[in-house]
Amino acid sequence: MLTSKQRAYLRSLANSIDTIVIVGKSGLSDDIAKQTDDALTAREIIKGKVLTETCPCSSREAADTLAEQTGSEVVQVIGSKFVLYRRNEKEPKITLPKASRKGM
């Protein structure tokens, strides 16, 4: 589970990356899930887009479903775009800010 500080950090990283997963009229197929999984393994953070005119699901539904299928976390959903994050255990590329112990 990401803290708000970690989520904010990941959102700032996502600003500069390109959209690499596009969900279109075929919806959430196995190919999209495989592409998302491969991209998360390589990059840890990815940006996706739902073509709202043709896709049968909303961007929130797409993000939640892909996160569940790939074992990742939804960082943010804004409009038709979403950001997913999954730490690469073998070769981590992103160092998240430490969770504070305040309030525990």
Image (cartoon, rainbow, N blue to C red):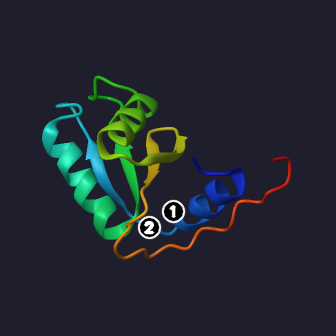
Q: Position of residue 58 (x, y in %)?
A: 40, 27
Choose between 80 and 66: the one closer to the eye: 66
Q: What residue is drawn where x is 29% and y is 51%? A: 21
Choose between 12 and 34: the one closer to the eye: 34
| Amino acid type assigned to the residue bearing label 2 in the image | Ile
> Is 63 placed left or right of 76 in the picture?
left
Q: What residue would you read off at disc 2?
A: 17
Instruction: Please determine whether, in this image, residue 72 is positioned above or below residue 50.
Output: below
> Is 85 placed left or right of 98 in the picture?
left
| Marks 2 and 1 close (CB-CB < 8 Å) | yes
| Amino acid type assigned to the residue bearing label 1 in the image | Ala
- The residue sitting at the left extreme is 31
Q: What residue is drawn where x is 46% and y is 51%? A: 83
Q: What residue is drawn where x is 28% and y is 29%? A: 55
The quarter holding residue 23 reads: top left
Q: Is mark 1 on a helix, strand or loop?
A: helix
Q: What residue is drawn where x is 37% and y is 49%? A: 48
Q: Where is residue 61 in the image (x, y as percent from the top left)?
A: 40, 28
Q: Where is residue 98 in the image (x, y as percent from the top left)?
A: 68, 66
Q: What residue would you read off at disc 1?
A: 14
